[in-house]
Image: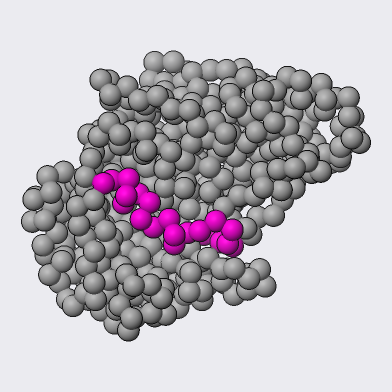
Amino acid sequence: MADQRAITTRGATLADTVLKESVIQDFKTRLRGALLRPSDAGYSDARKIWNAMIDKQPALIVRCVGAADVVSCVNFAREHNLLVSVRGGGHHAAGFGVCDGGLMIDLSPMKGMRVDPARKTVQAQGGATWGDFDRETTAFGLATPGGQVSTTGIAGLTLGGGVGWLSRKYGLSCDNLLSVDVVTADGNFLTASASENTDLFWGVRGGGGNFGIITSFEYRLHPVAQVLGGPMIYPLDQAKDVLHFLRGYLPTVPDELTVLLIFMTAPVDPMFPANLHGKVILAPAVCFTGDLAEGERVLRPLRSFGTPAADFIAPLPYATLQSMFDAQVPPGFHSYMKSMYLFDLSEGAIEAIVECGASMTSPLSHLHLMQLGGATSRIGEEDTAFSSRAVGYECYLEPIWANPAEADRHIAWVRDSWSILQGVSSGAGYLNRSSEEGQAELRSTYGTKKYERLVALKNKYDPTNFFRLNHNIKPTV
């Protein structure tokens, strides 16, 4: 094989370099996992991530099978000043897991997991998805908060906070972390927890992938078997009435209940009434965690409101609810997302949400309104890097389309809607569901004091900005 062109980093500057064939072969001997180059079988599939809008070609991909491979990758990239991307589940819309011309450190083969049912804990490697995770933990009747889609990776979701069906009852994914194993930019392997490297432990709980590569997560688990969950379906002309009802209802419900409102186009599917096929609908989806009879009582006002076209709420395994909406976010399509927090469902917020939901430009697109609060809001704002715990809702825009030529139209819907919703938002958003954020937006999201604390952490653990393909906290040293 020939020498390989690659991209180097020098501060903020990117430049070309050439990696000698002998250097690459020597690197390969240090790895247990596969080293892939553009001409290798498997390279094309390995570089693909969930969002087909991101089409990048790394010079090298290492499919890591353990922490030692990760350490070798970090040391090799540092020695040669290579641009680095880190892939866990590869589900973030911004496509941080892949880079052009650099080294893609792919954790997706690292799915090892060990549940301790007596201690109610689990150790999970950084390449696992929530589907992998839930299959292991729910076998023991245990779970921890983990998003609303089973194909999402545990790593990216947790490092950005981790809002999920169970968050109002048990907090965010990052609130349930007990420890993490981290490979830092200097190639060191550290454990961070409440008693060890505590500053780093604070930062990884909401600060994203800025400070290192997490090879293993240890989580606290909770007793969760069956839940009362699933969607209801309302035609669009009832959406305002439903939202007005929820404005009074949701503040009264217990932490065991979470409601996610979805504006979407009803597909041609037996699950949806035929008269709604191809039309925008409102689908309130629920998860009640606890006594099912109590859940029926709590949900009775919602299930008896208005004239729903369908009601699919029923007792079901938690893992089934976690994967129920996977088909709405299939891999291989194009996406561009933005998020904002709302304090409450004001009259202005209801008007804006319905206006934006009704104007979606793709039949695969969604507008979501996620109920927050509960246990998430009772963690101290300064206890973790995750911010905006006092808000009541997260609203996020998720266009999905197949034809690359349509990108401008669908992205314009997101940006126009986001501008409308900014008038009723808190001024911050959930970074796990944002395709792009600048430094000003990051400072706004974290707040000045917390942002400066994150910069100080970056200066300590990654002063050269080795880990820069993320919602990047830039070092100042």
Q: Is residue 370 visible?
A: yes
Q: Which colour style is shown?
A: one colour
Q: Quadrant of the N terminus?
A: top right
Residue 123 relative to residue 308: left or right: right
Nearest the camera: 297 or 433? Answer: 297
Q: Is residue 40 magenta?
A: no
Give the quarter of the image for residue 154: top left
* Region of the chain picked out in magenta, as a range: 317-337
Q: Residue at x 19, y 52 (%)?
A: 315
Residue 14 relative to residue 281: left or right: right
Q: Residue at x 83, y 25 (%)?
A: 25
Residue 73 relative to residue 267: left or right: right
Instruction: Give the vertical position of 350 relative to 298 (above or below).
Output: below
Q: Quadrant of the C terminus?
A: top right
Q: Is residue 9 visible?
A: no
Q: How many marks?
A: 0
Q: What x and y, as percent, mark residue 91?
A: 53, 48
Q: Is residue 331 magenta?
A: yes
Instruction: Give the vertical position of 157 relative to 354 (above or below).
Output: above
Q: What x and y, as percent, mark residue 67?
A: 58, 22
Q: Residue at x 21, y 74 (%)?
A: 308
Q: Residue at x 46, y 48 (%)?
A: 151
Instruction: Give the vertical position of 259 relative to 37 (above or below).
Output: below
Nearest the camera: 176 or 437? Answer: 176
Residue 424 relative to residue 39: left or right: left
Q: What x and y, as percent, mark residue 301?
A: 11, 65
Q: What x and y, as percent, mark residue 143?
A: 30, 36
Nearest the camera: 320 or 82? Answer: 320
